[in-house]
Structures are given as structure tokens and as C-alpha cells.
Amino acid sequence: MSLSADFAFTQGSLQDYADCARRFELRFIKRLRYPALETQEPLQFEKRTRQGVRFHKLVQQHLHGVPAEALTASLADDGELAGWWATYLARGLTGLPAARYPEITLQTQLAGRRLVAKYDLLALAPGGAAVIVDWKTGARAPSKAYLSGRMQTVVYRYVLAQAGAHLYAGESIPPERIQMDYVFVAAGGARLSLNYSAAQMGEDEALLSGMIAAIERADAFALTDDVRRCRFCSYRSLCDRGAPGQLEEFDLDEYENEDEEEALSLDFDQIAEIEF
Amino acid sequence: MRAPLDAKVWLEGMAGCGKTTVGLSRVIGLLERGAPADSILIFVPQRSMALPYIAALRGRQAYRGGQVWLQTIGSLSLRMVEMFWFLVAAEAGFKRPRELPNFLSLELVQYFMTRAIEPLVDERDYFASVRIDRPRLYSQIVDNMNKAALVGFPISEIGSRLKAALANGVEQAHIYDDAQTCAMAFREYCLARNLLDFSLQLEVFRDYVWATPQARAYLRGRCKHLIVDGVEEDNPASHLFLSDLLETCESALIIYDRDAGFRRFLGADPASARRLRDSCELKATLDETLVMGAQVTALGAQLAAQLGASVAGEGDVDPRPALIAEAQRYHPEMVDWVARQVDMLVNERDASPNDIVILAPFLSDALRFGLADGLARLGIPVRSHRPSRALRDEPAARTLLTLARLAHPRWALPPTDFDVVFALMTAIKDLDLVRAKLLTEMLYRQGRLLPFSEVRSTAMQARVTFDLGERYDRLASWLNRYLEDERSDAIDIFFRRLFGGLLSRAGFGFYADVDASNTAQNLVDSARGFRWSLDFMRRYEADIDLGLDYVNMVDRGVIANFYLRDWIADAEEGVLIAPAYTFLLNNRPVDYQFWLNIGSEGWSRRLYQPLTHPYVLSRGWTAGRMWTDDDEQHLSRETLGRLLLALTRRCRKAVYLGYSELSESGYEGRGLLLETIQALLRRYARAGQHV
């Protein structure tokens, strides 16, 4: 069994492969959907995940013209979320270029495959800065070195450089103009900025092409040796790798389950599939 | 194809002439010319019609940039209402405008409809004379509300419109009054709780969201290039929206199939679609078939002509070589005959299984199974396609539901012995029916599973085997521990805990089983969706037990009665077995078609729907007219004529007719399709005698 012909790589799928090739195989090649619990506190975990989703929606609504007061009024029942929101209003957009594209998806081609990035926000000034903003709602802000190595950083900057010309007056965006900002709204709006360069882009391209090629030619996908990576993996029981981890040890910002996102959005096309 | 890419073009023609191919080349042309992908909106009446576009876009290797939008009126209105909710909720009449909206899936609409109107129906003895089950009855009330929104009249007019055209006597009038009262009661219920069924979602989009400058700026700023395929299958609400968008977009291609409009039961309105023609500066027609051979062309045209349609292409061609039939006495003989003919086509004429479809007006489980089994025995791959599939009938889901009942005695819903046997057999790997029955008989007492040590007879213990007994014990003690800990997990969390903690472990039935895992995930999604939409209900009804309600609704066939993820099975290879209209809306021509049960009235008659009516509730209906038997007959002939034309236009080589004197249920069928075909054959037989 191999990847379907129209499979598109994302930062999520590549991070899965980097963490555990077996997880990648189960999720994206065997397409095994597996409902085991990720943590021992499933409802708290769910609450935090849904708060994160709601925060991203609030920002999107705001940037599409819904007045901040109307959105603030909707948060009376959730003090924590209201706090994140207040932080966003105070500092979230400070210094960003004026042309802003929330929740935008870009794609490019690499090693014969589509590579897709879904951004929280792109803020660009043609001829000037091109800033990728990613909102983080986890309690902790990780180190710069850690974030630099995450596939999200690698994929997002690379795809924008390759596929963002139409947002930049039709010109290719020079890598040096690209900046990736992680904004930690639960940590007072701390901002961690990562710059980009042509050299880094070359390295990223080599890394991504190498990973895609390795996946394409693999005939076996090894289970990770690092069992700490299994604590919050839903395939844990299949691999016989112990019990779910504690929520307090879990970094919610690492949880980027694209299946989950799909489940969160109801699809009313089904109305068309039913004859009454 | 040569039309300028910055023009607004109306393209019409019959099926099989390459209209969608033109649409595809236009999308590619726009991208090649440098149009940003996210400025292109492809608008279709239902998702399956977007599949050729998705395949073409994914297959384009060199493409970089944003993503082309693919939307239906349902998906677009959902997105827009969600985005601009806080701008419009108060004005639209919602009682809690500062709280989030709750969008209801179809199954949740049924659930809330049951909660909202069942007390009313019981108390006032509504619909007393209607002999259909409650879920079907409620779904027709929902259908009326959807039609009102799609066509564009207030839901308060549903009853009066139906009565004016259809009421024959006081009893019938009462039924429509009841339907009206229930629709209004449901709408009030939804407005009070921020619930949005499809009809309300569409009304909020059309009447409120689309009126805001923010929403208009967003959509008009984004949608510069519009491609609409299958516009005749869409509804007036879509047409109104598209008409507005046409004013501001830079280019458009609107594709219209002349003899279609099959989704009338979902508000399809070809006449309304045609009005968009005036908004396009270029008009083009494609009428040369790229699909049918001359005999199939003649077959479609002559059958349609017999039913009163005027169709080009009838000509002098004798269609009989494209029509293969053999009468059988009994239904199973017909199924066998079909399997043998498919086998012959695949193995003797090198036909691809992908180029063969087997169609019936309705597809019963028995017919589907008979065909799939017959073809599988001949080594021919099969894919089946039908709108709904009961999740609760899947073994993994049944097992989880039975175990949930065992773990929640407070629900007072102890499973039957039969269900426990089935659950044990599915949950414990290698446990056979005989041992599962033994365990149930010996250890299932008063709604609980006793430990294996309660089996006193060593002979009986040995018969079950200690290995299976040990695994049974792990299951029983997991459930009993859950009970003793007095846990009250949400039902979806219970399923997940049981799945991850036990059933997916080595030695248990779901271990490394892809189907079981996927089914379990579907059940979890369904139960979680139910919980998320109902959590807020505790404000109104503090004693609501979501787990109990969920299981009850599953039992009644309201919830988990179908699941969307299983619908998307289009990429599979094999002979397609499907209801005729499902095949049409997939819009893919094939070499050979089998039309089964041609004696069935189902080919031409509408479904029995005593509470609704697709024509009377359509935009084209004249107020004050009565719907007569003549109208019904005319409609049957017109419907069948269109259907046969549409089917033959998606057929390259031949049509095989499956006919048995006695139908699946043992009756002789003399439906309009059979009559029409016999008349055609008689005409040729008479002409032959004169030669």
C-alpha cells in the first residue's frame, strides 16, 4: 500500500513522519481512524482544544469586519478565552503590514507532490515585509530553537516563498522578506519571530524533498524508539505503548489533528444526499 | 472553449456533449493566465458534481498559489452565517444573539424535531390518519421548511399552499394544518435556542447575512471568476445568489443541462436557472454527443418520444441492437441473469467493470446483496452507492452500544440475550457463536456480566477454554469497574475509553481491524456531535441524560442512521450498483447500463409523501390551481421520459433490461417503463411484418 496519487503533504503529516513513521503510515497510508483517548482528562483536553478553535474563529471574524465589541460580548461565559482575546486586541496585530489574509491556504509542488500550508494569518506589504502569524493558545512558549525545527516553521516559510506571489503584487517574495511570528496569547501575547533567508530556504527544500522521497520509497514504517512521543498518540493501544498521558504534560499547540478539524465543521451537503 | 476568459458565458446542451470538459479547461485557462486560484469559485448543486474539478486541480503538477473555492449553497451559507453571526443574530430573531449558533446536521434536526413537536403531536393527536412512521413524517415537515427556504416563500405559507392545491376534504386539510403548526413550533423552538436547521441557516444567509456590507465585501472581493456547473439542478435560492454575484464578478461560465433538473425533490428548478442566461453576454450551445452510439441515441429519443417528449435524434435508426432483454419468472432468476451478462461483458468482450452500472429505482438491501454476492462469486469487483447506511447496523457500533447499556444500568435499557451474544462474539477475538451463547446463558444475569469464576462446572469452563474465559473476565471486570466507580463519562468518551482501554488491545475483536476502528470513530463522531449540540440544553432541562437520549435515538433510527464519511467511496473500482438518480448525479458516462425491475412503478412514480409536494411547493406553481390526477399522470410520463433520456445520454453502447414477472416482493409489476418498452418493441415488430 502506498500514498494515494492525489495525497498532499502538510506540516501536520510531515511532523507525524518526523515524530514516528509508523504513525504517519497508520494515519495517511492506511487511513486508520482510531478513537482512543489522547489524554487521561479527555473533557479538559477537549475544552482546551475547542477554546483554541474558537479563538482562531474570533480572529478570523474580526479581520473580516465583525466589530470587536460584538465579539467581546460573546465571551462572557469564558474568562480564559476573553483574556486571550483581550491580549489579541491589545497586541496581536501591532506592527503588521496592512494587507491581511486570515485563514488562507497556499500550495506548491515539491518532489512531484503537492505541499499545502494553511495559515492563521498572512500580513504583507508588497515590496516590504511578508509576515506569517500563528496564534498559539498553549500555556507555555517553547524555545526559539525548538520552534525553528518544527515542520510548521519549515513548511510555512517555504510554501509562502514559493506560492505567495499573487499576494505580493505578482512578484516572488524574497526569502529575506519573510518572517514567521508565533504569538502566545495565553502568555501575555509574547511574540517569537523567526526570520528567513535564501540559504535557509535551500536547506528546507532539501529537507522536505528528502522526507517526501523517503516516504515515497519506504516499504516499512518504523515505530519510534522514543516512547515519550507515544504518550499522547491515539494509536498507542495498537502499538502496545502504555496508557494515555497527563494533560498537564501535554503541549496543546502541538496538537494539529486535521481529522479533528474536519469533524469540527459540519457539512450540510448531506442535505442533498437524502431523499425524503 | 474559445470564449474569452474575461467574458460571462452561458453554455447549454444535452448531457454527454463535453460541457464539464469546457468547465475544466476554463479553470485551467484562468490559472494559466495568472488568475489567483482563490479568486475562482466553482459552484455546484451537490458535492459529487465537483469531483471532476477536484481531480483536475489535484492532477495539475505545476500549479502554485492559493486554492480554488468549491462550494454549494449549503456549504457557503454555513460558512457565511458562522462568520457573520454576531452581526445578524438579533435581527434574525434569535433569542440569545450573544451566544454561538448551533448548526444542526440532519440527524440532529430529526432529534430536535422529535423533542420540539412530539409532545404536541401526541397531545393533540396530530396526523392521526397518516399511516407512516414518525421519523418519515418529521422528515417531511423538515422537507417543507427546506423547500420554503430554497424556493423563497415564508414557512407560514406551507399549509395554505398545500391545502389550496391538494386538500380533498376536511381530513386532508387538517393534515396540512398540522404540518403547518409543527413547522412553526419547530422554528420557534430553534430561534429560542440558537439552533439552525438547513432552512433557517439558508434564510439567515439570504435575508440577513448577504445584506451586510461586510459579507458582500468579503464574497465579492474574493469571487472574481465564477464557474457554475449543473445550474439546472440547483434551487432558486442559489440562483438568486448567483445572479447577484454575476453583477460584480469579472468572468463567469454557467453550465446548463437542457433535459435535466432531476433534484426537484430538493428544490431543483431549471426554469429559475434559465433566468441567469440573461446575465451572460455570450451564449453557446453544445449538442453533439461525445458519448452515445447511433442506436443508443435512437433508443433514448424514441422512448422519450413515446412518453410525449419532443427530442431531436429519433431518426430512422432501429434501436433494438442496443437493447438486450430476457424475461425471467422470478426475481432471483433475474439477478442471476444480470450477473451472467456482466460476466460475459467483462470476460468475453473485455468491458471494464468501471464502465458497467446496474440501476434500479430503489435499491433494497436484498437486491444489493444478491447482486454483489453473485458478482463477487464470479470474481467481478463491485461498488455500491446509496444515500444512507445505518451506522447502528455495523457490528462494531452494535457492540459498543450494547456494552454501553451494560455499563449504564440507570438507563433501564438492559440489552437482550441476543445482543449480548453478538457483542461478546465481536468484542472477544476468536470467540465463536456457540461459546458466546454459553457465556451469555451462564453469566448474563439481571443486566450484568458475572465473572468467569461463577461457572461452576469445570467441564463447561474447559469447553469455553480458559484463554477465552480470561479475556471474557477482562471485559466483564472493565465494565463492572466502570459501574462500581460510578463514572458518568459522556457517551462518546465512554466509547473511546472502552475502545482504547480494551477492545483495541491484542486478544480483542477490534485489534488491528481497520473497519471496526473506523466504525468506532464514526460512532464517536456522531455521539460527540450530539453532545456538543446538546450541552447547552441543560440550561433548559437540567435532568437531561445525553447518553440515554443518544442510545434511545439510535434505537429509533433517528441518530446514526447514516454516516457521511462512508458515502465518499467513489474512487473504488468495480461495477457500480446504485439507484438511477444517484448514478445520474455522479455524471459519469459508462459503456453498459442494466436497468432492473423494469416492471416497477418506482421508475415513474413519486415517493409517497402525504405531507409535502415538490411541484406545489415550487416557484413555478400557480396559486389557486388544484393538483389533479391528470397532473400526476402527466408528471409520471414526463419524469420517466427525462430519466430515460438522461440515462441513455450517459450510455455508450447498450442497455440491458432486467425483468421478472414476479417482483422482489412477489407481485406482478406492470409499470410505465415496461409499458413504454413493450410499445416500442411492438411498433418495430409490426413494422417488420409489413416489410
Image: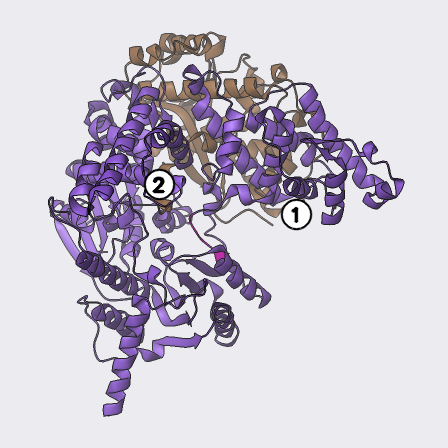
Percent of width and height locating residue B417: 66, 40
Label of residue B137 in the image:
2
Please give the range of residues in magenta: B383-387
Q: Nearer the viewer, residue A59 or B665?
A: B665
- Chain B: give its colour: purple
Q: Residue at 59% of width from left, 40% of height from top?
A: B398
Q: Is residue A242 visible?
A: no
Dominant secondary structure, magenta: loop
Q: Is residue A185 visible?
A: yes
Q: Are marks 2 and 1 in contact (CB under 8 Å)?
A: no
Label of residue A219 in the image:
1
Q: Residues within 10 Å of mark 2 (few under 14, many from 20)?
A: many
Q: Is residue B449 left or right of residue B630?
A: right
Q: Residue at 31% of width from left, 67% of height from top?
A: B673
Where, quadrant-wise, is the C terminus of chain B in this rendering?
Answer: bottom left
Where, quadrant-wise, is the N terminus of chain B in this rendering?
Answer: bottom left
Q: In the image as oriented, which residue stretches furthest toward the bottom?
A: B691
- Chain A: give its colour: brown
Inspect the image, locate mark 2, and give the three-letter code of the amino acid beneath it.
Answer: Leu
